[in-house]
Image (tube, grey):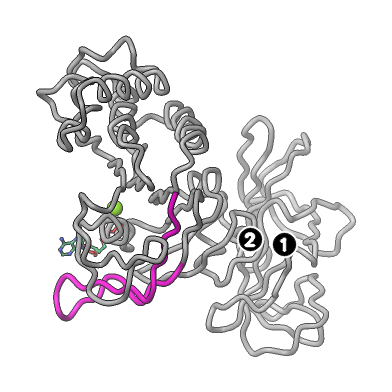
Amino acid sequence: MVSISLRSISKSYTPLAKVLHDISFEIREGEFLVIVGPSGCGKSTLLRMIAGLENITSGELFFDDKKMNDVLPKDRDVGMVFQNYALYPHLTVSENISFPLTLRKVEKAIVKKRVAEVSLMLQLEELLQRKPKELSGGQRQRVALGRAIARSPKCFLFDEPLSNLDAQLRNQMRSEILSLQKKVGATSIYVTHDQTEAMTMGDRIAVLNNGILQQVGTPKEVYHNPVNMFVSGFVGTPSINKIWGSVDNGRFISSGKEINISLKGFINEDAVICAFRPEDIIIDKDSALQAEIQSFEYIGHETLLYLRIGSESITVRTTDTDTYRRREKIGIKISPEKVLLFDKNENNVSHKSV
Ligand code: ADP
Ligand code: MG
């Protein structure tokens, strides 16, 4: 196991355009850290720099107390798993798994033993003589995992390894990867654009946007106490509700009228954004705050209601089984302790503890 430290790492592919800006954070020994962000934000670039496949423009990378900037990829002791599996088509499953060992001229008997262990762990014993084209997507991804763990690396790097799989298989593979990682104990960095994957898999999550690190925290911290508007909107589906307005004497005012949210303790501000998650709205027919139902989606265990208050649209998630009608007015309440407030620079100024 190893701890990984990124210190002010930046990357430019061309002299004028920086794709990563001054990234600093630590990955603890044995931790499963997920880097999440929209497509193109620099996740793969960051991971490839940690693997040594891309050079670091400025800043320092440490594995424990060893600086790694100039260490060759093959000497970094990382196992990498890619989205497109990157298996050798002309080699069997067994040969694909053993490839990194054979490359390092490991003794035949040891290779054989290791392939047996790995294929048992990943339920590949029956498939060892097949070629990649004779496997399903899930099986191929398992072989790619097998190849990454064959050498028992100090650390795993995953780049969107489940993006090519269907939803059900993706769920199954998520828990397989996690239990494998717990069993092997290797420090892991997992890159994805899928916030659900990040929330469900990460011990901690690093949120990246436009090459800038936004926040590093546990899924709970990131969900309940996002540092800024971007993070608040990126995690959680349906997305967090946002209403633009201002605070006036402890009340929230939007489009000229008072929205019934008490914000005691907040100073008066010209412009603020009030945000609350769809599940933090209570339907209460006696509430003074009335909203009109625009549409709704019944999805079995819950209903999503799309409402309008004044000129604002909000989404409510409710588990009650009432029947709703379009254009109907309903009363709602927003739990004040759940409300997040952002200043005009879109920074979270509500400072909630989680
Ligand atoms: P992500 O993995 O988050 O989708 P990438 O790290 O692949 O993002 O890309 C980040 C940015 O760097 C993008 O704007 C992309 O076009 C650019 N980029 C990636 N690889 C190269 C490269 N080899 N040469 C030039 N630009 C690149
Ligand atoms: Mg990528």
| Residue found 48% across the figure and 31% down from its top | 171
Asked if the residue under mark 1 is in contact with the one under mark 2, i.e. CB atoms within 8 Å, the reply is yes
Residue under the image location 30 percent in, 41 percent down: 81
**Mark 2 vs mark 1: which is more N-terminal?**
2
Q: Is residue 343 above or below residue 31?
A: below
Looking at numbered disc 2 in the image, what kind of residue is underneath it? Glu
Residues drawn in magenta: 1-25
Q: Disc 1 marks which amino acid?
A: Val
Extreme residue toward the right, this view:
286
Secondary structure at badge 2 equals: helix
Any atom of ligand 1 within 8 Å of the CB at mark 1? no
Say above or below: 195 vs 172.
below
User: Is 121 placed left or right of 31 in the picture?
Assistant: left
Residue 337 place in picture, x, y as percent: 79, 66
Q: Nearer the viewer, residue 261 or 195?
A: 195
Q: Is residue 300 above or below residue 254?
A: above
- Give the residue at mark 1: 354
At which x and y percent is residue 280?
73, 55
Q: Residues within 10 Å of mark 1 (few under 14, many from 20)?
A: few
Image height check: is 102 above or below 209?
above
**CA separation, marks 2 and 1?**
6 Å
Is disc 2's CB within 8 Å of ligand 1? no
Q: Is residue 160 left or right of residue 264?
A: left
Find residue 49 and report its image quarter.
bottom left
Task: Please tell me how crowded label 2 is: few (under 14), some (14-19), or many (20+) other residues with Cα within 10 Å.
Answer: some
Instruction: Based on the picture, tell me whether residue 170 belongs to the magenta stretch.
Output: no
Which quadrant does the C terminus fall into?
bottom right
Task: Tell me what residue is drawn at x 57 percent, y 78 percent.
Answer: 347
Q: Nearer the viewer, residue 70 or 6?
A: 70
Residue 23 within the segment the image draws in magenta: yes
